[in-house]
């Protein structure tokens, strides 16, 4: 079992051109990721007190398009202020649709050491636009 998982967070909010806040709890580090950029963060287990917290920078106005969150299925997560969103699980990915509206959602990602088939590297993609039915964002 890996001691940690390198998670790459991709900001593909290209239509909305919004920045993404990423907070890494165990390091007490906060990052702001511009659209079309990414960051890789080593995620430890929830038993070690580690998690990632993601949210869109509020900015002016509402989000005019759906927002898609593409998350590995091995992780545990909590989404707050989801509203009328959808949850889609496809293969080894989970896809969340956040409907247009105020950018008030937040995502907390954790990894439990009980997930024995977690890889040593994976990714999370936040984007707007079309998605494929296999969970991947275009």
Image (spheres, rainbow, N blue to C red):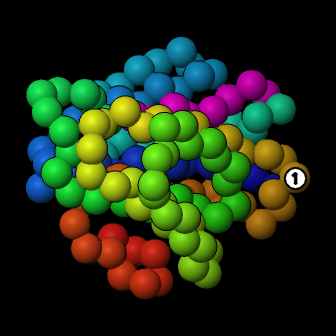
The structure residue drawn at horizontal position 54% and vertical position 37%, both measured from the top left corner, is 80
Q: Residue furthest bottom?
A: 133
41 inside magenta stretch: no
The structure residue drawn at horizontal position 48% and vertical position 38%, both measured from the top left corner, is 81
Return the residue nearer the eye: 94 or 115.
Answer: 94
Return the residue nearer the eye: 60 or 56.
Answer: 60
Residue 93 appears in the picture as rendered: no
Residue picked out by circle 1: 114
Q: Residue furthest front?
A: 84
The structure residue drawn at horizontal position 69% and vertical position 61%, both measured from the top left corner, is 74
Q: Residue furthest top?
A: 28
Residue 25 appears in the picture as rendered: yes
* Residue 12 horizontal/vertical position (percent): 24, 55
The quarter of the picture where the N terminus appears is bottom right
Q: Is residue 122 above or below residue 57?
A: below
* Residue 50 horizontal/vertical position (percent): 68, 29
In the image, the segment drawn in magenta is: 48-55
In screen coordinates, is 34 left or right of 30? left
Q: Residue furthest right?
A: 114
The structure residue drawn at horizontal position 67% and vertical position 41%, both measured from the top left corner, is 110
Secondary structure under tag 1 reads: loop
* Residue 84 horizontal/vertical position (percent): 45, 55
């Amino acid at each position: 079992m890996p001691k940690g998982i390198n998670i790459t967070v991709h900001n593909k909010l290209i239509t909305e051109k919004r920045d993404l806040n990423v907070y890494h709890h165990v390091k007490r580090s906060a990052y702001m990721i511009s659209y079309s950029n990414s960051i890789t963060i080593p995620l430890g287990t929830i038993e070690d007190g580690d998690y990632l917290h993601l949210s869109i920078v509020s900015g002016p106005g509402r989000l005019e398009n759906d927002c898609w969150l593409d998350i590995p299925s091995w992780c545990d997560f909590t989404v707050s202020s989801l509203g009328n969103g959808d949850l889609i699980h496809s293969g080894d990915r989970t896809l969340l649709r956040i409907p247009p509206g105020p950018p008030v959602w937040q995502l907390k990602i954790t990894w439990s050491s009980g997930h024995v088939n977690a890889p040593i590297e994976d990714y999370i993609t936040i984007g707007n636009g079309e998605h494929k039915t296999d969970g991947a964002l275009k």
